[in-house]
Image (cartoon, rainbow, N blue to C red):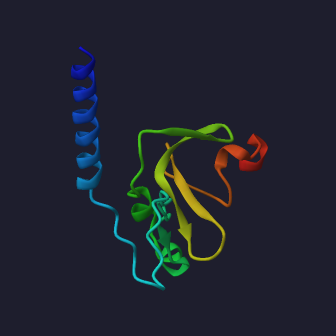
């Protein structure tokens, strides 16, 4: 019985040693080359931009056809349909955030919900 246990331990030890030697080691990069990092990358999300000249040249009909979502927001005392992302108007600092139910564009520097109702009058 003692010899059987010794034989099993010896076979298990030899199998473990063979398994460890058969595993491939990660090759080292050549000198002077940094190994790649596996840290997750933050996706870059850019808001669409509309040049100021384009914004100034839009007709009321073209503004009314801007793509909006079903998501609603509120500006002052009126509801509006949000765009999927705010459209920056050139480098003015203003963005188009959506369209009101009456067809007016919602243009603001910050999220329209961050303004008091009286600021939209």
| Coordinates of residue 45 in the picture (x, y in percent) | 48, 61
Closer-to-camera residue (85/35): 35
| Coordinates of residue 56 in the picture (x, y in percent) | 53, 75
Q: Residue drawn 68% across and 61% down?
A: 109
Closer-to-camera residue (23/30): 23
Q: Residue drawn 45% across and 72% down?
A: 35
User: Taking 17 as reference, is 30 above or below it?
Assistant: below
In the picture, the quarter occupied by the N terminus is top left
User: Taking 111 as reference, is 1 above or below it?
Assistant: above
Identity of the residue furthest to the bottom in this view: 32
The image quadrant that residue 66 belongs to is: bottom left
Closer-to-camera residue (111/66): 111
User: Taking 57 as reference, is 64 above or below it?
Assistant: above
| Coordinates of residue 39 in the picture (x, y in percent) | 49, 59
Q: Is residue 88 visible?
A: yes
The image quadrant that residue 107 belongs to is: bottom right
Identity of the residue furthest to the top in this view: 1
User: Taking 33 as reference, is 43 above or below it?
Assistant: above
Q: Residue drawn 34% across and 70% down?
A: 27
């Amino acid at each position: 019985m003692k010899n059987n246990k010794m034989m099993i331990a010896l076979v298990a030890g030899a199998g473990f040693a063979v398994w460890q030697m058969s595993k491939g080691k990660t090759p080292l990069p050549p000198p002077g080359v940094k190994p790649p990092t596996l840290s997750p990358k933050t996706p870059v999300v850019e808001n669409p931009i509309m040049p100021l000249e384009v914004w100034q040249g839009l007709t009321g009909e073209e503004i009314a056809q801007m793509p909006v979502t079903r998501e609603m927001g509120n500006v002052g005392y009126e509801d509006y349909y949000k765009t999927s992302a705010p459209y920056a108007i050139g480098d003015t600092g203003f963005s188009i955030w959506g369209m009101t139910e009456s067809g007016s564009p919602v243009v603001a520097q910050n999220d329209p919900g961050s303004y008091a109702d009286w600021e939209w009058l």
